[in-house]
Amino acid sequence: MVAIKKKKTLATFNRKRKIFYISLIALPVLQFCVFYLGVHINSILLAFKSYTLADEANGVYSYIFTGFENFGEVFQNFAKESYLVNAIWNSVLSFLIGWIGFFGSLLFSYYIMKSWRLGKLFQLFLFLPSIISEIVVVTLFKYFMENNMPAFIEMVGGGVVEGFMFSSDLGVRLGTILGYSVWVGFGTNILIFNGTMAGVSDSVLEAAKLDGVRPLREFFSIVLPMTYPMIVTMAVVSVANLFTNQMYLFSFYGASAERQLYTIGYYLFLNTQQAGNSGLGEYPYLAAFGIVVSAVTIPLTVAFRKVLNKIGKRFE
Amino acid sequence: MNNDFAKESRLRRWLRSKIKAKEKMNAFSWVVFAFLTLLTLTFIIVYFWGIMTSFKSILEFDTVGNIVGLPDQWSLENFIFVFSNFRIKLSGKTFYLENMILNSVLYAVGCAFIQTAVQCVVAYLAAKFRFKFSGLIYWVVVITMTIPVVGTDISTIQILQNIGLYDSMIGMFVLKFNFLGAYFLVFYATFRSLPDDYAGAAYVDGAGEFGILIHVILPMVANMFFTIFLLNMITYWNDYRTPLLYMPNNPTLSYGIQWLSTSSLQEFSHTTVRLAACIIMVIPIIVVFIVFKNRIMDKVSLGGIKE
Protein backbone atom coordinates (compact mmCIF):
# COMPACT_ATOMS: atom_id res chain seq x y z
CA MET A 1 0.00 0.00 0.00
CA VAL A 2 2.79 2.37 1.00
CA ALA A 3 4.74 1.38 -2.12
CA ILE A 4 1.75 2.16 -4.36
CA LYS A 5 1.27 5.51 -2.65
CA LYS A 6 4.96 6.31 -3.10
CA LYS A 7 4.77 5.32 -6.77
CA LYS A 8 1.69 7.53 -7.25
CA THR A 9 3.42 10.48 -5.56
CA LEU A 10 6.48 10.00 -7.80
CA ALA A 11 4.28 9.81 -10.88
CA THR A 12 2.49 13.05 -9.89
CA PHE A 13 5.87 14.67 -9.19
CA ASN A 14 7.19 13.67 -12.61
CA ARG A 15 4.00 14.76 -14.36
CA LYS A 16 4.12 18.17 -12.67
CA ARG A 17 7.77 18.56 -13.63
CA LYS A 18 6.97 17.68 -17.25
CA ILE A 19 4.07 20.14 -17.38
CA PHE A 20 6.28 22.86 -15.90
CA TYR A 21 9.09 22.01 -18.33
CA ILE A 22 6.88 21.99 -21.40
CA SER A 23 5.03 25.16 -20.44
CA LEU A 24 8.29 27.10 -20.11
CA ILE A 25 10.20 25.65 -23.03
CA ALA A 26 7.39 25.59 -25.61
CA LEU A 27 7.58 29.25 -26.70
CA PRO A 28 11.38 29.48 -27.00
CA VAL A 29 11.37 26.23 -29.00
CA LEU A 30 8.60 27.59 -31.24
CA GLN A 31 10.63 30.77 -31.73
CA PHE A 32 13.66 28.63 -32.64
CA CYS A 33 11.59 26.60 -35.11
CA VAL A 34 10.32 29.73 -36.87
CA PHE A 35 13.31 32.07 -36.66
CA TYR A 36 16.16 29.60 -36.96
CA LEU A 37 14.96 26.43 -38.68
CA GLY A 38 12.23 28.23 -40.62
CA VAL A 39 14.54 31.05 -41.66
CA HIS A 40 17.23 28.65 -42.87
CA ILE A 41 14.82 26.41 -44.76
CA ASN A 42 13.16 29.47 -46.29
CA SER A 43 16.58 30.82 -47.25
CA ILE A 44 17.42 27.60 -49.10
CA LEU A 45 14.05 27.56 -50.86
CA LEU A 46 14.34 31.23 -51.79
CA ALA A 47 17.69 30.56 -53.41
CA PHE A 48 15.98 28.33 -55.96
CA LYS A 49 13.16 30.76 -56.76
CA SER A 50 12.67 33.91 -58.79
CA TYR A 51 10.23 36.74 -58.31
CA THR A 52 8.54 36.93 -61.68
CA LEU A 53 5.29 37.96 -63.33
CA ALA A 54 3.08 34.95 -62.72
CA ASP A 55 -0.22 36.38 -63.93
CA GLU A 56 0.30 38.77 -66.80
CA ALA A 57 -3.38 39.68 -67.14
CA ASN A 58 -3.66 40.92 -63.56
CA GLY A 59 -0.01 41.96 -63.21
CA VAL A 60 0.57 39.63 -60.27
CA TYR A 61 4.15 38.81 -59.31
CA SER A 62 5.04 35.77 -57.26
CA TYR A 63 7.93 33.45 -56.43
CA ILE A 64 8.37 30.48 -58.74
CA PHE A 65 11.04 27.77 -58.71
CA THR A 66 13.75 28.39 -61.28
CA GLY A 67 16.34 25.80 -60.28
CA PHE A 68 19.94 26.97 -60.08
CA GLU A 69 19.37 30.23 -61.95
CA ASN A 70 20.29 32.41 -58.95
CA PHE A 71 23.45 30.44 -58.26
CA GLY A 72 24.42 30.88 -61.91
CA GLU A 73 23.90 34.61 -61.51
CA VAL A 74 26.07 34.66 -58.38
CA PHE A 75 28.96 32.94 -60.16
CA GLN A 76 28.48 35.10 -63.25
CA ASN A 77 28.71 38.19 -61.10
CA PHE A 78 31.93 36.95 -59.54
CA ALA A 79 33.33 36.36 -63.03
CA LYS A 80 32.04 39.68 -64.40
CA GLU A 81 32.45 42.15 -61.54
CA SER A 82 36.05 42.64 -60.50
CA TYR A 83 34.98 44.45 -57.32
CA LEU A 84 33.38 41.23 -56.02
CA VAL A 85 36.61 39.28 -56.43
CA ASN A 86 38.35 42.22 -54.79
CA ALA A 87 35.80 42.00 -51.97
CA ILE A 88 37.01 38.46 -51.22
CA TRP A 89 40.59 39.72 -50.94
CA ASN A 90 39.52 42.62 -48.77
CA SER A 91 37.65 40.21 -46.49
CA VAL A 92 40.72 37.98 -46.20
CA LEU A 93 42.97 41.00 -45.65
CA SER A 94 40.70 42.31 -42.92
CA PHE A 95 40.63 38.85 -41.33
CA LEU A 96 44.44 38.60 -41.35
CA ILE A 97 44.84 42.11 -39.96
CA GLY A 98 42.38 41.09 -37.23
CA TRP A 99 44.96 38.60 -35.97
CA ILE A 100 47.29 41.43 -35.02
CA GLY A 101 44.59 42.69 -32.68
CA PHE A 102 43.93 39.13 -31.48
CA PHE A 103 47.55 38.47 -30.47
CA GLY A 104 47.88 41.98 -29.09
CA SER A 105 44.80 41.38 -26.90
CA LEU A 106 46.33 38.17 -25.54
CA LEU A 107 49.62 39.86 -24.72
CA PHE A 108 47.98 42.90 -23.14
CA SER A 109 45.61 40.71 -21.13
CA TYR A 110 48.66 38.93 -19.73
CA TYR A 111 50.17 42.31 -18.82
CA ILE A 112 46.97 43.24 -17.00
CA MET A 113 46.77 39.83 -15.33
CA LYS A 114 50.26 40.33 -13.92
CA SER A 115 49.08 43.63 -12.36
CA TRP A 116 52.06 45.38 -13.85
CA ARG A 117 52.33 49.17 -13.97
CA LEU A 118 49.07 50.98 -14.86
CA GLY A 119 47.50 47.68 -15.93
CA LYS A 120 43.99 48.66 -14.80
CA LEU A 121 44.17 52.00 -16.60
CA PHE A 122 45.28 50.32 -19.83
CA GLN A 123 42.46 47.80 -19.48
CA LEU A 124 39.94 50.62 -19.16
CA PHE A 125 41.13 52.45 -22.27
CA LEU A 126 41.45 49.31 -24.35
CA PHE A 127 37.94 48.27 -23.37
CA LEU A 128 36.28 51.64 -23.99
CA PRO A 129 35.76 51.09 -27.76
CA SER A 130 33.74 47.98 -26.85
CA ILE A 131 31.46 49.96 -24.54
CA ILE A 132 31.05 52.98 -26.79
CA SER A 133 29.00 52.45 -29.92
CA GLU A 134 30.98 51.48 -33.01
CA ILE A 135 29.38 54.30 -34.96
CA VAL A 136 30.58 56.85 -32.38
CA VAL A 137 34.18 55.58 -32.26
CA VAL A 138 34.24 55.38 -36.06
CA THR A 139 32.87 58.93 -36.38
CA LEU A 140 35.48 60.27 -33.93
CA PHE A 141 38.27 58.47 -35.77
CA LYS A 142 36.93 59.44 -39.20
CA TYR A 143 36.95 63.18 -38.51
CA PHE A 144 40.19 62.97 -36.56
CA MET A 145 41.91 61.45 -39.60
CA GLU A 146 40.05 63.61 -42.08
CA ASN A 147 40.37 67.01 -40.37
CA ASN A 148 42.80 66.92 -37.49
CA MET A 149 45.66 64.86 -38.92
CA PRO A 150 46.14 66.90 -42.13
CA ALA A 151 45.87 70.14 -40.10
CA PHE A 152 48.37 68.82 -37.57
CA ILE A 153 50.81 67.65 -40.26
CA GLU A 154 50.59 71.06 -41.92
CA MET A 155 51.07 72.79 -38.56
CA VAL A 156 54.31 70.91 -37.84
CA GLY A 157 55.64 71.73 -41.28
CA GLY A 158 54.83 68.50 -43.09
CA GLY A 159 53.17 70.30 -46.00
CA VAL A 160 49.62 70.14 -47.23
CA VAL A 161 48.12 66.65 -47.21
CA GLU A 162 44.58 65.62 -48.01
CA GLY A 163 42.27 63.89 -45.51
CA PHE A 164 42.87 60.20 -44.97
CA MET A 165 39.29 58.93 -44.98
CA PHE A 166 38.25 60.54 -48.27
CA SER A 167 41.68 60.53 -49.87
CA SER A 168 41.78 60.25 -53.66
CA ASP A 169 44.29 57.43 -53.18
CA LEU A 170 42.34 54.24 -52.56
CA GLY A 171 45.36 52.65 -50.88
CA VAL A 172 45.43 55.41 -48.27
CA ARG A 173 41.73 54.89 -47.52
CA LEU A 174 42.11 51.12 -47.24
CA GLY A 175 45.23 51.52 -45.08
CA THR A 176 43.44 53.94 -42.76
CA ILE A 177 40.47 51.59 -42.33
CA LEU A 178 42.75 48.64 -41.67
CA GLY A 179 44.70 50.80 -39.22
CA TYR A 180 41.44 51.53 -37.43
CA SER A 181 40.67 47.78 -37.28
CA VAL A 182 43.98 47.12 -35.56
CA TRP A 183 43.61 50.14 -33.26
CA VAL A 184 40.25 49.04 -31.86
CA GLY A 185 41.03 45.33 -32.31
CA PHE A 186 43.49 45.32 -29.40
CA GLY A 187 40.65 45.78 -26.96
CA THR A 188 37.91 43.70 -28.59
CA ASN A 189 38.54 40.48 -26.73
CA ILE A 190 40.42 41.88 -23.78
CA LEU A 191 37.63 41.38 -21.21
CA ILE A 192 37.08 37.75 -22.13
CA PHE A 193 40.83 37.05 -22.24
CA ASN A 194 41.28 38.81 -18.91
CA GLY A 195 38.42 36.97 -17.26
CA THR A 196 39.79 33.63 -18.40
CA MET A 197 43.42 34.39 -17.56
CA ALA A 198 42.33 35.42 -14.07
CA GLY A 199 41.25 31.80 -13.61
CA VAL A 200 44.77 30.42 -14.14
CA SER A 201 45.70 28.78 -10.87
CA ASP A 202 47.90 30.91 -8.63
CA SER A 203 49.71 27.83 -7.38
CA VAL A 204 50.83 26.92 -10.92
CA LEU A 205 52.16 30.44 -11.47
CA GLU A 206 53.79 30.45 -8.06
CA ALA A 207 55.47 27.11 -8.70
CA ALA A 208 56.73 28.34 -12.07
CA LYS A 209 58.05 31.49 -10.45
CA LEU A 210 59.91 29.51 -7.81
CA ASP A 211 61.41 27.43 -10.62
CA GLY A 212 62.78 30.65 -12.09
CA VAL A 213 60.45 30.84 -15.10
CA ARG A 214 60.59 34.29 -16.69
CA PRO A 215 57.46 36.21 -17.78
CA LEU A 216 57.88 35.64 -21.53
CA ARG A 217 58.26 31.90 -20.98
CA GLU A 218 55.38 31.94 -18.49
CA PHE A 219 53.15 33.60 -21.09
CA PHE A 220 53.96 31.16 -23.89
CA SER A 221 54.40 27.97 -21.87
CA ILE A 222 51.84 28.29 -19.08
CA VAL A 223 49.22 30.97 -19.64
CA LEU A 224 48.56 30.36 -23.35
CA PRO A 225 48.30 26.54 -23.05
CA MET A 226 46.07 26.82 -19.96
CA THR A 227 43.69 29.22 -21.65
CA TYR A 228 43.82 27.35 -24.95
CA PRO A 229 40.11 26.31 -25.06
CA MET A 230 39.11 29.97 -24.85
CA ILE A 231 41.65 30.94 -27.50
CA VAL A 232 40.27 28.23 -29.81
CA THR A 233 36.71 29.47 -29.27
CA MET A 234 37.59 33.06 -30.09
CA ALA A 235 39.80 32.10 -33.04
CA VAL A 236 37.06 29.91 -34.52
CA VAL A 237 34.55 32.74 -34.12
CA SER A 238 36.89 35.04 -36.05
CA VAL A 239 37.13 32.52 -38.91
CA ALA A 240 33.35 32.09 -38.88
CA ASN A 241 33.05 35.87 -39.30
CA LEU A 242 35.42 35.94 -42.28
CA PHE A 243 32.68 36.79 -44.78
CA THR A 244 30.34 38.71 -42.51
CA ASN A 245 33.07 41.14 -41.48
CA GLN A 246 32.21 44.55 -42.91
CA MET A 247 35.56 46.17 -42.08
CA TYR A 248 33.49 48.99 -40.51
CA LEU A 249 32.65 50.21 -44.03
CA PHE A 250 28.99 50.93 -43.31
CA SER A 251 29.95 52.94 -40.25
CA PHE A 252 32.56 54.92 -42.19
CA TYR A 253 30.78 55.51 -45.47
CA GLY A 254 27.17 54.38 -45.06
CA ALA A 255 25.89 53.00 -48.34
CA SER A 256 28.39 54.94 -50.46
CA ALA A 257 31.71 53.15 -49.90
CA GLU A 258 33.96 52.89 -52.92
CA ARG A 259 33.35 49.53 -54.65
CA GLN A 260 37.02 48.66 -54.56
CA LEU A 261 36.85 48.79 -50.76
CA TYR A 262 33.94 46.34 -50.48
CA THR A 263 34.15 43.23 -48.35
CA ILE A 264 31.75 40.33 -48.85
CA GLY A 265 30.09 41.17 -45.52
CA TYR A 266 29.52 44.79 -46.55
CA TYR A 267 28.18 43.76 -49.97
CA LEU A 268 25.69 41.36 -48.37
CA PHE A 269 24.60 43.79 -45.66
CA LEU A 270 24.20 46.70 -48.07
CA ASN A 271 22.12 44.69 -50.54
CA THR A 272 20.01 43.10 -47.80
CA GLN A 273 19.27 46.48 -46.27
CA GLN A 274 18.30 47.95 -49.62
CA ALA A 275 16.26 44.91 -50.65
CA GLY A 276 14.39 44.96 -47.32
CA ASN A 277 13.19 48.46 -48.13
CA SER A 278 12.35 47.98 -51.74
CA GLY A 279 12.80 44.91 -53.84
CA LEU A 280 11.24 41.50 -53.33
CA GLY A 281 12.97 40.56 -56.56
CA GLU A 282 16.39 40.73 -54.95
CA TYR A 283 15.59 38.24 -52.17
CA PRO A 284 16.34 35.03 -54.10
CA TYR A 285 19.68 36.27 -55.44
CA LEU A 286 20.80 37.33 -51.96
CA ALA A 287 19.69 34.00 -50.48
CA ALA A 288 21.72 32.16 -53.14
CA PHE A 289 24.71 34.44 -52.48
CA GLY A 290 24.46 33.61 -48.77
CA ILE A 291 24.42 29.88 -49.48
CA VAL A 292 27.47 30.12 -51.75
CA VAL A 293 29.37 32.05 -49.06
CA SER A 294 28.23 29.61 -46.34
CA ALA A 295 29.41 26.69 -48.49
CA VAL A 296 32.92 28.15 -48.23
CA THR A 297 32.78 29.34 -44.62
CA ILE A 298 31.33 26.23 -42.94
CA PRO A 299 34.00 23.71 -44.06
CA LEU A 300 36.69 26.32 -43.46
CA THR A 301 35.52 26.89 -39.89
CA VAL A 302 35.17 23.18 -39.15
CA ALA A 303 38.63 22.45 -40.59
CA PHE A 304 40.16 25.34 -38.67
CA ARG A 305 38.65 24.09 -35.42
CA LYS A 306 39.99 20.59 -36.09
CA VAL A 307 43.49 21.91 -36.73
CA LEU A 308 43.41 23.99 -33.55
CA ASN A 309 42.14 21.04 -31.53
CA LYS A 310 44.95 18.89 -32.92
CA ILE A 311 47.46 21.52 -31.91
CA GLY A 312 45.76 21.66 -28.49
CA LYS A 313 46.34 17.95 -27.95
CA ARG A 314 50.07 18.66 -27.85
CA PHE A 315 49.49 20.74 -24.72
CA GLU A 316 47.72 17.93 -22.88
CA MET B 1 42.15 20.89 11.57
CA ASN B 2 40.97 24.48 11.20
CA ASN B 3 44.25 25.63 12.66
CA ASP B 4 46.21 23.73 10.02
CA PHE B 5 44.04 25.21 7.32
CA ALA B 6 44.53 28.74 8.66
CA LYS B 7 48.29 28.15 8.87
CA GLU B 8 48.38 26.94 5.28
CA SER B 9 46.40 29.96 4.10
CA ARG B 10 48.78 32.27 5.91
CA LEU B 11 51.70 30.47 4.31
CA ARG B 12 50.15 30.82 0.87
CA ARG B 13 49.48 34.53 1.43
CA TRP B 14 53.05 35.07 2.60
CA LEU B 15 54.42 33.13 -0.38
CA ARG B 16 52.27 35.13 -2.79
CA SER B 17 53.32 38.44 -1.26
CA LYS B 18 56.98 37.38 -1.55
CA ILE B 19 56.53 36.40 -5.18
CA LYS B 20 54.56 39.58 -5.97
CA ALA B 21 57.29 41.64 -4.41
CA LYS B 22 59.80 39.94 -6.64
CA GLU B 23 57.66 40.48 -9.71
CA LYS B 24 59.29 43.62 -10.90
CA MET B 25 59.07 45.05 -14.37
CA ASN B 26 61.59 43.41 -16.67
CA ALA B 27 62.62 44.12 -20.25
CA PHE B 28 59.64 42.27 -21.67
CA SER B 29 57.10 44.09 -19.51
CA TRP B 30 58.74 47.45 -20.21
CA VAL B 31 58.37 46.88 -23.95
CA VAL B 32 54.68 46.02 -23.53
CA PHE B 33 54.27 48.96 -21.16
CA ALA B 34 55.76 51.35 -23.73
CA PHE B 35 53.46 50.03 -26.44
CA LEU B 36 50.39 50.19 -24.18
CA THR B 37 51.26 53.74 -23.14
CA LEU B 38 51.48 54.84 -26.77
CA LEU B 39 48.22 53.06 -27.61
CA THR B 40 46.41 54.59 -24.63
CA LEU B 41 47.72 58.02 -25.57
CA THR B 42 46.25 57.67 -29.06
CA PHE B 43 42.86 56.80 -27.50
CA ILE B 44 43.07 59.78 -25.15
CA ILE B 45 44.06 62.14 -27.97
CA VAL B 46 41.23 61.01 -30.29
CA TYR B 47 38.57 61.11 -27.53
CA PHE B 48 39.79 64.45 -26.24
CA TRP B 49 39.90 65.94 -29.72
CA GLY B 50 36.33 64.71 -30.33
CA ILE B 51 35.01 66.20 -27.08
CA MET B 52 36.92 69.42 -27.60
CA THR B 53 35.70 69.83 -31.17
CA SER B 54 32.07 69.30 -30.16
CA PHE B 55 32.44 72.44 -27.99
CA LYS B 56 33.77 74.60 -30.84
CA SER B 57 31.39 76.78 -32.79
CA ILE B 58 30.80 75.94 -36.45
CA LEU B 59 32.32 79.32 -37.34
CA GLU B 60 35.46 78.64 -35.35
CA PHE B 61 36.00 75.15 -36.80
CA ASP B 62 34.89 75.59 -40.41
CA THR B 63 35.63 79.23 -41.16
CA VAL B 64 38.42 80.30 -38.80
CA GLY B 65 40.00 76.89 -39.21
CA ASN B 66 40.80 76.18 -35.56
CA ILE B 67 40.91 72.40 -36.03
CA VAL B 68 43.78 71.29 -33.82
CA GLY B 69 43.78 73.75 -30.92
CA LEU B 70 41.55 74.21 -27.88
CA PRO B 71 38.28 76.09 -28.47
CA ASP B 72 38.59 79.88 -28.21
CA GLN B 73 35.27 79.76 -26.45
CA TRP B 74 33.67 76.60 -25.12
CA SER B 75 30.29 76.75 -26.81
CA LEU B 76 27.18 74.59 -26.34
CA GLU B 77 25.68 75.64 -29.68
CA ASN B 78 26.23 72.25 -31.32
CA PHE B 79 24.47 70.41 -28.50
CA ILE B 80 21.60 72.89 -28.55
CA PHE B 81 21.41 72.53 -32.33
CA VAL B 82 21.29 68.72 -32.09
CA PHE B 83 18.62 68.80 -29.37
CA SER B 84 16.42 71.22 -31.28
CA ASN B 85 17.01 70.25 -34.91
CA PHE B 86 18.08 66.64 -35.16
CA ARG B 87 15.34 64.75 -36.95
CA ILE B 88 14.99 62.04 -39.57
CA LYS B 89 12.22 61.83 -42.12
CA LEU B 90 11.36 58.25 -43.00
CA SER B 91 8.37 57.20 -45.09
CA GLY B 92 6.70 60.57 -44.55
CA LYS B 93 7.12 60.43 -40.76
CA THR B 94 9.44 62.70 -38.82
CA PHE B 95 11.44 61.29 -35.92
CA TYR B 96 12.93 63.75 -33.44
CA LEU B 97 15.76 63.12 -30.99
CA GLU B 98 13.33 62.23 -28.19
CA ASN B 99 11.59 59.64 -30.42
CA MET B 100 14.95 58.06 -31.18
CA ILE B 101 15.97 58.03 -27.52
CA LEU B 102 12.65 56.39 -26.61
CA ASN B 103 13.12 53.78 -29.34
CA SER B 104 16.66 53.15 -28.11
CA VAL B 105 15.53 52.66 -24.51
CA LEU B 106 12.73 50.32 -25.57
CA TYR B 107 14.99 48.39 -27.92
CA ALA B 108 17.98 48.14 -25.56
CA VAL B 109 16.15 47.41 -22.30
CA GLY B 110 13.35 45.32 -23.84
CA CYS B 111 15.54 43.12 -26.05
CA ALA B 112 18.22 42.74 -23.36
CA PHE B 113 15.69 41.68 -20.73
CA ILE B 114 13.83 39.29 -23.04
CA GLN B 115 16.96 37.62 -24.35
CA THR B 116 18.63 37.31 -20.93
CA ALA B 117 15.45 35.93 -19.35
CA VAL B 118 14.86 33.38 -22.11
CA GLN B 119 18.49 32.22 -22.08
CA CYS B 120 18.46 31.96 -18.29
CA VAL B 121 15.19 29.99 -18.05
CA VAL B 122 15.98 27.63 -20.94
CA ALA B 123 19.48 27.03 -19.55
CA TYR B 124 17.91 26.20 -16.18
CA LEU B 125 15.53 23.71 -17.79
CA ALA B 126 18.31 22.15 -19.85
CA ALA B 127 20.70 21.90 -16.89
CA LYS B 128 18.36 20.74 -14.15
CA PHE B 129 15.71 18.65 -15.91
CA ARG B 130 17.44 15.55 -17.16
CA PHE B 131 15.14 14.84 -20.10
CA LYS B 132 16.50 13.76 -23.48
CA PHE B 133 15.16 17.00 -24.93
CA SER B 134 17.40 18.97 -22.54
CA GLY B 135 20.48 17.34 -24.06
CA LEU B 136 19.18 18.21 -27.51
CA ILE B 137 18.72 21.86 -26.53
CA TYR B 138 22.31 22.03 -25.30
CA TRP B 139 23.68 20.58 -28.52
CA VAL B 140 21.49 22.83 -30.65
CA VAL B 141 23.07 25.86 -28.96
CA VAL B 142 26.61 24.50 -29.39
CA ILE B 143 26.07 23.52 -33.04
CA THR B 144 24.40 26.79 -34.05
CA MET B 145 27.32 28.65 -32.52
CA THR B 146 29.91 26.72 -34.45
CA ILE B 147 28.24 26.57 -37.88
CA PRO B 148 28.39 29.98 -39.51
CA VAL B 149 25.48 30.30 -41.93
CA VAL B 150 25.74 33.55 -43.89
CA GLY B 151 23.07 35.61 -45.59
CA THR B 152 19.91 34.56 -43.77
CA ASP B 153 18.90 38.16 -42.98
CA ILE B 154 16.86 38.42 -46.14
CA SER B 155 14.92 35.26 -45.21
CA THR B 156 14.31 36.65 -41.70
CA ILE B 157 12.99 39.88 -43.22
CA GLN B 158 10.65 37.91 -45.46
CA ILE B 159 9.28 35.83 -42.57
CA LEU B 160 8.80 38.96 -40.43
CA GLN B 161 6.97 40.61 -43.34
CA ASN B 162 4.75 37.54 -43.81
CA ILE B 163 3.67 37.48 -40.16
CA GLY B 164 3.26 41.26 -39.99
CA LEU B 165 6.11 41.93 -37.57
CA TYR B 166 8.56 43.61 -39.93
CA ASP B 167 9.44 47.20 -39.08
CA SER B 168 8.04 47.06 -35.54
CA MET B 169 9.44 46.98 -32.02
CA ILE B 170 7.29 43.92 -31.23
CA GLY B 171 9.02 42.16 -34.12
CA MET B 172 12.39 42.93 -32.55
CA PHE B 173 11.22 41.53 -29.19
CA VAL B 174 10.02 38.35 -30.93
CA LEU B 175 13.37 38.03 -32.74
CA LYS B 176 15.24 38.32 -29.44
CA PHE B 177 13.01 35.78 -27.69
CA ASN B 178 15.64 33.14 -28.37
CA PHE B 179 17.94 31.06 -26.26
CA LEU B 180 20.86 30.72 -28.68
CA GLY B 181 24.24 32.28 -27.94
CA ALA B 182 27.23 32.21 -25.62
CA TYR B 183 25.35 33.49 -22.57
CA PHE B 184 23.15 30.37 -22.64
CA LEU B 185 26.33 28.37 -22.04
CA VAL B 186 27.37 30.69 -19.21
CA PHE B 187 23.98 30.19 -17.48
CA TYR B 188 24.05 26.47 -18.25
CA ALA B 189 27.47 25.99 -16.63
CA THR B 190 26.29 27.93 -13.57
CA PHE B 191 23.09 25.91 -13.15
CA ARG B 192 24.99 22.65 -13.57
CA SER B 193 27.30 23.65 -10.74
CA LEU B 194 24.43 24.58 -8.38
CA PRO B 195 23.66 21.79 -5.90
CA ASP B 196 20.15 20.31 -6.01
CA ASP B 197 19.79 20.50 -2.21
CA TYR B 198 18.18 23.96 -2.11
CA ALA B 199 15.50 23.10 -4.64
CA GLY B 200 14.97 19.74 -2.89
CA ALA B 201 14.50 21.43 0.49
CA ALA B 202 12.02 23.91 -1.02
CA TYR B 203 10.15 21.03 -2.62
CA VAL B 204 9.89 19.24 0.75
CA ASP B 205 8.53 22.50 2.21
CA GLY B 206 5.74 22.37 -0.36
CA ALA B 207 7.01 24.74 -3.02
CA GLY B 208 6.04 24.07 -6.63
CA GLU B 209 8.42 24.09 -9.59
CA PHE B 210 7.52 27.66 -10.47
CA GLY B 211 8.01 28.80 -6.86
CA ILE B 212 11.40 27.10 -6.75
CA LEU B 213 12.47 28.86 -9.94
CA ILE B 214 11.32 32.28 -8.75
CA HIS B 215 12.20 32.13 -5.04
CA VAL B 216 15.19 29.78 -4.93
CA ILE B 217 16.98 29.53 -8.27
CA LEU B 218 16.72 33.04 -9.73
CA PRO B 219 17.95 34.79 -6.54
CA MET B 220 21.00 32.51 -6.66
CA VAL B 221 21.92 33.68 -10.16
CA ALA B 222 20.60 37.23 -9.81
CA ASN B 223 24.09 38.77 -9.98
CA MET B 224 24.99 36.90 -13.12
CA PHE B 225 21.59 37.66 -14.64
CA PHE B 226 22.08 41.37 -14.03
CA THR B 227 25.62 41.39 -15.45
CA ILE B 228 24.53 39.61 -18.63
CA PHE B 229 21.50 41.90 -18.88
CA LEU B 230 23.82 44.92 -18.64
CA LEU B 231 26.19 43.58 -21.30
CA ASN B 232 23.26 42.81 -23.61
CA MET B 233 21.75 46.22 -22.95
CA ILE B 234 24.98 48.01 -23.86
CA THR B 235 25.23 45.90 -27.03
CA TYR B 236 21.67 46.74 -28.10
CA TRP B 237 22.00 50.42 -27.22
CA ASN B 238 25.04 50.60 -29.52
CA ASP B 239 23.63 48.39 -32.27
CA TYR B 240 22.40 50.22 -35.35
CA ARG B 241 22.60 47.44 -37.92
CA THR B 242 19.74 45.27 -36.59
CA PRO B 243 17.22 48.15 -36.38
CA LEU B 244 18.37 49.31 -39.83
CA LEU B 245 17.57 45.89 -41.27
CA TYR B 246 14.46 44.88 -39.35
CA MET B 247 12.78 48.15 -38.36
CA PRO B 248 14.05 50.67 -40.89
CA ASN B 249 11.26 53.14 -40.21
CA ASN B 250 11.64 53.20 -36.41
CA PRO B 251 15.10 54.67 -35.88
CA THR B 252 16.96 54.23 -32.62
CA LEU B 253 19.53 56.80 -31.51
CA SER B 254 22.40 54.68 -32.80
CA TYR B 255 20.65 54.35 -36.17
CA GLY B 256 20.10 58.12 -36.11
CA ILE B 257 23.79 58.83 -35.47
CA GLN B 258 24.73 56.51 -38.33
CA TRP B 259 22.30 58.37 -40.59
CA LEU B 260 23.62 61.73 -39.37
CA SER B 261 27.28 60.84 -39.82
CA THR B 262 26.78 59.88 -43.48
CA SER B 263 23.96 62.31 -44.31
CA SER B 264 24.38 64.72 -47.19
CA LEU B 265 22.02 67.33 -45.69
CA GLN B 266 23.85 70.65 -45.41
CA GLU B 267 22.61 71.50 -41.90
CA PHE B 268 24.00 68.27 -40.44
CA SER B 269 27.22 68.20 -42.45
CA HIS B 270 29.32 70.10 -39.91
CA THR B 271 31.89 68.00 -38.08
CA THR B 272 31.22 69.83 -34.80
CA VAL B 273 27.48 69.01 -34.96
CA ARG B 274 28.12 65.36 -35.76
CA LEU B 275 30.58 65.02 -32.90
CA ALA B 276 28.16 66.70 -30.48
CA ALA B 277 25.49 64.13 -31.48
CA CYS B 278 28.01 61.36 -30.81
CA ILE B 279 28.75 62.75 -27.33
CA ILE B 280 25.01 62.87 -26.53
CA MET B 281 24.67 59.24 -27.54
CA VAL B 282 27.62 58.11 -25.44
CA ILE B 283 26.62 59.81 -22.17
CA PRO B 284 24.04 57.22 -20.98
CA ILE B 285 26.41 54.32 -21.67
CA ILE B 286 29.29 56.06 -19.89
CA VAL B 287 27.02 56.62 -16.86
CA VAL B 288 26.00 52.93 -16.85
CA PHE B 289 29.63 51.94 -17.25
CA ILE B 290 30.84 54.17 -14.40
CA VAL B 291 28.11 52.87 -12.06
CA PHE B 292 28.63 49.20 -12.90
CA LYS B 293 32.30 49.27 -13.94
CA ASN B 294 33.50 46.54 -11.60
CA ARG B 295 30.57 44.30 -12.39
CA ILE B 296 31.12 44.64 -16.13
CA MET B 297 34.92 44.39 -16.11
CA ASP B 298 35.31 41.50 -13.68
CA LYS B 299 32.64 39.01 -14.62
CA VAL B 300 33.33 37.93 -18.16
CA SER B 301 35.06 34.69 -18.99
CA LEU B 302 34.56 32.16 -21.73
CA GLY B 303 35.79 28.75 -22.66
CA GLY B 304 37.27 27.92 -19.28
CA ILE B 305 40.71 26.95 -18.12
CA LYS B 306 42.42 23.76 -19.17
CA GLU B 307 42.82 21.47 -16.16
Image (cartoon, coloured by chain):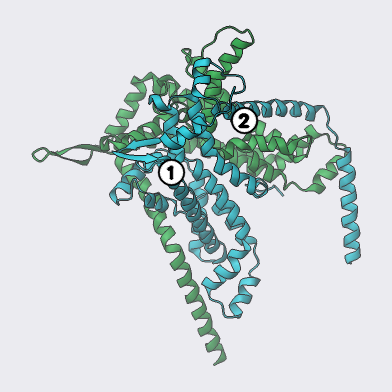
Chain colours: A green, B cyan
Q: Is residue A126 above or below residue B164?
A: above
The residue under label 2 is: A101
Asked if residue A242 can be seen in this view, the reply is: no
Q: Which residue occupies 42% across, 54% down? A: A32
Mark 2 belongs to which subunit? A
Of residues A71 and B210, the one drawn nearer to the viewer in this rendering: B210
Of residues A281 and B168, the one drawn nearer to the viewer in this rendering: B168
The kind of residue on which mark 1 rests is: Glu
Secondary structure type for disc 1: helix
The residue under label 1 is: B98
- Spot the residue most to the bottom: A1
Q: Position of residue A147 (x, y in %)?
A: 53, 19
Q: Position of residue B161 (x, y in %)?
A: 30, 47
Q: Quadrant of residue A193?
A: top right
Of residues B150 and A276, the one drawn nearer to the viewer in this rendering: A276
Q: Which residue occupies 68% across, 29% down? A: B40
In space, the residues marked 1 and 2 are separated at their CA atoms by 37 Å
